[in-house]
Amino acid sequence: MTKSRPSTAASPGAPEHTTHPGTGVTTALGIVVDDAKPSGLLTLSGVEMWERFSFYGLQVLLAYYLYYSLGEGGLGLPQPVALGIAGAYGGLVYIAQIVGAWVADRVLAPKYVVLVGGSAILAGHIMLAIVPGLIGLIVGLALIVIGTGGLKVNTTMMVGELYPNGGPRRDAGYSIYYMGITIGAFAGPLVTGWLNQSWGFHVAFGAAAAGMALGLGQYVFGMRRLPASTGVVPNPLPAAERARWIWITAILIVAITLAVAFGLVRPDNISNVVALVVLVATLGLFTMLLTNRKVTRQERRAVVRYIPVFLMSLVFWTLLFQLFTAFAVFADTKIHLTVGSLTMPPSLIVTLESLAVAAITALLAVLWTRSRASRMQPVTKLVVGVIAMSAGAAIIVPFGLAAGVTMPLLVALLVMVFFAFGESLFAPSALSFTAELAPKAATSQMTALYFLTMAGGSTFAGWISQSYREGAEAQYFGTVAVVSLALIVALGVAYKLVDRAMSSR
C-alpha cells in the first residue's frame, strides 16, 4: 500500500490525537488527515483488526486440528484430506468476498452487511470452540466463510467512503487501516498458538471468538458514526428482479445441500469441487469482460494482457498458501522448535513471515524512492517475487532428504524471509496491474478476477499438498520449487509476447 506524504507535519510536542476546531483537520498517529472522520476510521480499523486476529488465529491451527489424532485433541482425519480441506476453506473465503461485494452493491447497505458478517464469524468461532467433531467443524467453517465474505471486502470499501475527496489523505487513512490488519494478523496466531500448546484447540478457538466479539462490539458501538453513504445500497436490485434472485439463491442452497447429502461433495474431494468453481467463475468473468459492449477495443486488449498476469498470480498464491498446508506439517514435524528451555509453537513461524513482509516492503519503498536505478519493471517484480519464493521452497529440500534430520530454527526463518521478499515484490505489483488494466465499465469484475487468483491459489495449495508425505519432503518441495520456477519464467515470456502483440495492433 502506498503511504502518503502529509502536507502538514505535526508539531514535535503535539499529542498523537488532536483536533483543530473549525479547520476540519485531525491529527491521528502523526498523520494529518483532512476530514478523516477518525471515529469511523478507528471503528473500521478495529473491526478489521479483530477479524484478522480471529481469521489467522484459526487458519494457522486448522490443518493441525484436522489431522491430529483424537488423543491429541484433533479430529483424526487422514493428513491428505486435512490439507485439502484447509486449502479449500481458504478458497471459499475468497470466493465469498465476491458474493459479499455483490450483496452490498445490490441488496443490503455495506455497513449492515459488515454487521451481519461479523455476527456470522463470531457464531462460527463459537461453534468451533464449543461443539466437538465434524458437526462443529462444518457449521463453524461455513459461518466463517459467509461472514468473512460480507465483512472484509466491505470494510475496505467503507474506508474509502471516509475520504470523499480521495487523494493522499485517503492513502493515509488506508495506511492506518492496514496497521490494524497487520497487528491482528500477527497477534491472532501468536495468542492461539500458545493457548493451543497449553490448553488445546478449543480454548484457542475460544480466543478467536473472543477477539471477534470485541471487534463486533466496537463496530456496533461506532457504526452510527460512519458516513451516510455506507447505509445506502448503491445499485439496488429492481423489484422485478428480486423474486428471480431469491429463487436462484434457494436453488443453490438446495443443490449444495443435496450434493453433500448424496456424497457428491465430501471431505476428500472438496478441493476438487472448489477448484472447479474457481475455473468456471474465471472463464465466465473473462468471457463477460471480453464480450461486454461497454468495454472498448483498447480495454479488451488490456484484458488479454491481464491473462498471463492472472496466471502468475495463481502461481504466487499457490506458493504462498503452502505456508498453511504442506509447510504447516513440515514445521510441526521437521523443524527444531526448541530454543533453550522454550518450545515455540509451529504456527508462530508462519506468523513471522507477515512481520518480515512489513519490514521488507518498507525497505523496498525507501530503496526505490531514493534510487531510480534500483527500480524494477512491474512485470519483473512479479517474476522475481515468485523466483524468490521458489528459492525459499528449495532451501527446504536438503532437510527432507533423510529421516531424523531436522531444520534449525534459523534456517526456517530464512525460508520465511525468502517468502516475505517474494510477497513484498509480487502482491503490490499484481494489485497495480489489476487496477491499471481494468476496463472503466467493469472494474468490479476485474477485482473479482484478482480475488479468484487468491481463491484458486489457496485451493490448489490444498490440492497439491495432498501428495505431501512424511519421509518424502524433499521430493515434494523440490517439485514445488522447480515447477513454480518454470511456470513463472514461461509466463513472464508470455506476458512480453502478449504485450508486444497487443501494442502493435
Image (cartoon, rainbow, N blue to C red):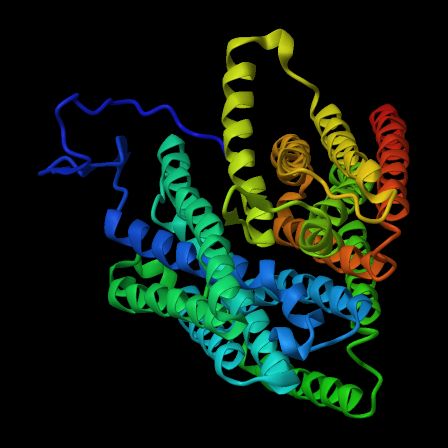
Measured as percent of width and height from the top left, residue 270 is found at 79, 73
**In the shown orientation, is residue 399 left or right of residue 365?**
right
Q: Is residue 109 visible?
A: no
Q: How many marks?
A: 0
Q: Residue at x 44, y 72 (%)?
A: 206
Measured as percent of width and height from the top left, residue 350 is found at 60, 47
Measured as percent of width and height from the top left, residue 64 is found at 65, 65
**In the shown orientation, is residue 471 left or right of residue 105?**
right
Q: Is residue 19 visible?
A: yes
Q: Residue at x 80, y 50 (%)?
A: 290
Observer-nearest of 305 and 421 = 421
Residue 132 lies in quadrant: bottom right
Q: Relative to residue 302, is residue 201 depicted above or below?
A: below
Observer-nearest of 147 and 213 = 213
- Looking at the rendering, in which quadrant would you find the C terminus? top right
Q: Residue at x 46, y 56 (%)?
A: 188
Observer-nearest of 297 and 75 = 75
Q: Residue lying farthest left?
A: 21
Q: Relative to residue 388, is residue 295 depicted above or below?
A: below
Residue 101 lies in quadrant: bottom right
Q: Residue at x 82, y 56 (%)?
A: 287
Q: Residue lying farthest front?
A: 341
Q: Relative to residue 80, is residue 420 depicted above or below?
A: above
